[in-house]
Structure formats: C-alpha cells, structure tokens
Image (cartoon, helix red, strand yellow):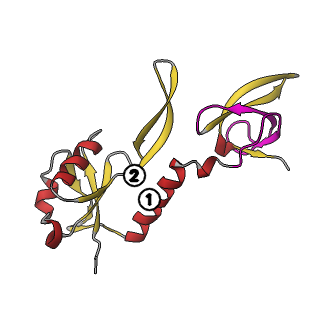
Amino acid sequence: MNITNWLLLQVKPKQETRALENLQRQGGECYCPQICIEKLSRGKRIQAEEALFPGYLFINVQPERNGLTYTNIRSSRGVSKIVSFGAEPIKVPETLIAQIKHREQADSIGILAKDLPQAGDNINITEGPFRGLKAVFSHTDGIQRSIVLINLLNQQAPTSLANTQIKKLA
C-alpha cells in the first residue's frame, strides 16, 4: 500500500527550481505546479512558465521509502522551512494534489481555451473593465488571449482580452 504524506515547503525567493532539483536528487517526490502566462519581455509579449504558488512546493515524505527526514528537507538548498501549525507540519491531502495536477494538465493542453469564436462572431465581454459590452471577435493572440473589436465612439477599437473574459453570443 502506498501511503502518501504530502507536506508544504516554503522555499527561498525565486528558488523553487533549485529546491525542487536538490530534493529530487535526494530521492524525494516533489511537485511544484507550473502555469503558463503571457508577460512582456523587452516590449514583446512572450509565453513563460512560472510557479503557480511562488515561494512554495509540495513534497511527499516517506522516510521508510526514500530516507528523507524533516532535517534533510529543511537543510536542502533553496528550502526555507516546512510550513506548519505550531510544531505539527501541515499535511496536504492527496486529493488536493491530484486536483492541482489535473487542472495543470487541462490548462497546458488548452482545454480552458476551447470553443473560441470564429473571426466576425459577436461576443459578450464577461469580465474586466469592458464587462457587459458587446464586441466582434477578430483573431487569437497567443494561447490565452484574443483580439476583439469594441465599438467605441462609432469606431471599432482592437483590444486584447483573455479568452476567459469573452463568451460567444448564441
């Protein structure tokens, strides 16, 4: 029987990868959920992967299987501390880890961006500062964004919105 004992670790700033690699080298089963985001780099919009929970990662502690103890974990490079309430480390349920992994996979294969409208379709903006306005779908802009044409002052102004902010009108 494989009993899981997932703990939450706080890592040093911007050292999720370093802590993950060091713990895996010691035989630990670690998990640092990643999310694909768009950000500006030198004036250009690029796709980048970042930690979903910056400064934290999960580890499955099984001392009888991998020999990792709390002391080994705390003293690993990049690790700041084991998150705990009082003296007792927080145990993260396996079901939560499975849900995060499922959501991460769904996001990476684009399930969240399916059913996008076609060029010329009328859409409704459901979130953000333009919420409630009607617009015309122009084209996709990367994996998670789209260009829509909003009618402002009798002119169609192109605007980039997240795919989650728009919905095709029936």
Q: Which residue is drawn at 82% across and 38% down?
A: 121
Lower position in the chain sequence, tag 1 or tag 2: 2
48 or 93: nearer the viewer? 48
Residue 135 to residue 158: above or below:
below
Residue that mark 1 sits on: 101
Q: How far apart are marks 1 and 2 (CA)?
A: 7 Å
62 in the magenta segment: no
Which residue is nearer to you in this view: 131 or 79? 79
Q: Is residue 46 above or below residue 92?
A: above
Q: Which quadrant of the rendered structure holds the N terminus?
A: bottom left
Image coordinates for residue 69, horizontal then vertical, percent: 13, 64
Bin the neighbour count of mark 2 within 10 Å (Cα to Cα): few under 14, some 14-19, many 20 and up: many
Q: Give the range drawn in magenta.
A: 115-143
Three-letter code, disc 2:
Pro
The residue drawn where x is 22% and y is 47% is 21
Q: Is residue 57 left or right of residue 125?
A: left
Q: How crowded is mark 1: few (under 14 residues within 10 Å), some or many (20 or more)?
A: some
The residue where tag 2 is placed is 33
Residue type pointed to by label 1: Lys
